[in-house]
Amino acid sequence: IERTLILVKPDGVRRGLSGEVLRRVEAKGYTLVAVDLRDASPEVLAAHYAEHEGKPFYQPLVDFMLSGKILAVVAEGQGVIPGFRSLAGATDPTAAAPGTIRGDLGRDWGLKVQQNLVHGSDSPESAAREIGLWFPSL
Ligand code: GTP
Ligand code: MG
């Protein structure tokens, strides 16, 4: 059965939206497999965001992800990888549709799309890689 990695980023945890994100995942019918509030390590973040290395927003993004606790989540269910991407909405919270996590709860705080509350794996390959990275015991 399909699994995805979800992160509530430091802006979401700081604003007290961890429970709201979990609520939406569960209300959609997906099952929580693992939930862990933690500080990310620079090593895990470098591997997690390897595809963005060299881009202008890379270092600010990593610094932001190190700025506070992250809620790391594995969720399970048929279609959960694209399904959570739909729940999350567009990367830019200003553009994200109402009804989505980013569209309902996110906005531009002056740091463009960096603070967009959540991450969700974008393919089965990414999900396998990211779950291995954040939850090596799963
Ligand atoms: P994730 O689910 O977090 O991976 O978001 P995504 O797949 O919608 O976006 P993508 O993988 O392209 O980028 C990863 C993260 O980098 C985004 O969620 C943003 O936090 C950040 N990011 C992406 N593009 C930009 C950008 O142009 N400027 C800034 N400041 N941040 C960006
Ligand atoms: Mg992505």
Image: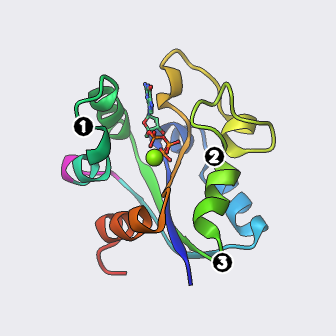
Residue 84's place in the image compared with 11, above or below, is below
Q: Amino acid at mark 2?
A: Leu
User: Dot 3 lies on which element?
Assistant: loop
Q: Which residue is mark 1?
A: 53
Q: Is residue 48 above or below residue 68?
A: below
Residue at 50% across, 56% down = 122
Instruction: Return the residue at label 2.
Output: 17
Give the quadrant of the C terminus. Answer: bottom left
SS of the residue under disc 2: loop
The residues tagged by marks 2 and 1 sit, at their Cα atoms, a distance apart of 28 Å
Q: Is residue 105 visible?
A: yes
Give the residue number, with chain letter if any, for mark 3: 78
Instruction: Compare marks 2 and 1 and give the one earlier in the sequence.
Output: 2
Residue type pointed to by label 3: Gln
Residue 118 lies, with reference to residue 37, above or below; the image says: above
Mark 3 C-beta to ligand 1 under 8 Å: no
Q: Are marks 2 and 3 in contact (CB under 8 Å)?
A: no
Q: Main secondary structure of the magenta part?
A: loop
Extent of the magenta region? 39-43
Residue extending farthest to the left is 43
Determine crowd level at label 3: few under 14, some 14-19, many 20+ residues with C-alpha closer than 10 A. few
Q: Is residue 22 visible?
A: no
Tell whether 103 sits left or right of 128. Answer: right
**Which callout, 1 or 3, points at the residue further toward the start of the chain?**
1
Query: Please, what is the three-letter code of the amino acid marked with disc 1?
Result: Glu
Disc 2 vs disc 3: which is toward the camera? Answer: 3
Give the Cα separation between the discs numbered 1 and 3: 31 Å
